[in-house]
Image (cartoon, rainbow, N blue to C red):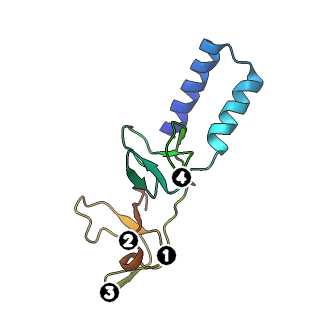
Amino acid sequence: SEAMRHLVVWVLLAVCLCGLDAGEVERLVREIIMHECAIPFVYGDVVYHSCTTVRSDFDWCSLDHVFRGRWRYCTATDPPKCTFPFTFKQRTFEQCTKEDYVLNRSWCSLTSNYNTDRKWKQCSPLQ
């Protein structure tokens, strides 16, 4: 993915500038990639229930429930996942929908009942 390519570039830059050895690079990459997103997280007085692109071209998440500068790019396997089926208004949805989304993008509920919980995310272009 594009985000992974950016991560590799940053790691290589760190190796060059900091003189890190291979073991240190492996530890750094593993810490960044393997650390789970802290969902939900607070960034700039806003609570995010999924990855965000705020101040970034790519989806990212905080590694702390209150953002403290530790973050990483999101991957397709990061939470939250769509919940199917879900109820929205008087209908049940088995897949992402564009209903009532003004930007003509698809979305899904993060819980089985959007009407009650109001938690959602945009679906990927492939969904």
Of tags 4 and 3, the one toward the viewer is 3
Q: What residue appears at the point 60 percent right and 20 percent down from the top-left corner?
A: 14
| Residue on which disc 4 sits | 76
| Residue on which disc 3 sits | 90
Residue 51 showing in the rendered view:
no
* 3D distance between C-alphas at marks 4 and 3: 30 Å
Q: Position of residue 117 (x, y in %)?
A: 41, 74
* Residue 96, picture quadrant: bottom left
* Residue 9, picture quadrant: top right
* 3D distance between C-alphas at marks 4 and 2: 22 Å
**Disc on res. 118:** 2
**Disc on res. 113:** none
Location of residue 127 with respect to 89 vertically, above or below: above
Q: Within 10 angstroms of label 2, few (less than 14), some, or many (20 or more) residues?
A: few
* 3D distance between C-alphas at marks 4 and 1: 17 Å
Residue flagged by tag 3: what amino acid is it? Gln
| Residue on which disc 1 sits | 84
Count every numbered label the image shows and give the total: 4
Q: Earlier in the sequence, mark 4 or mark 1?
A: 4
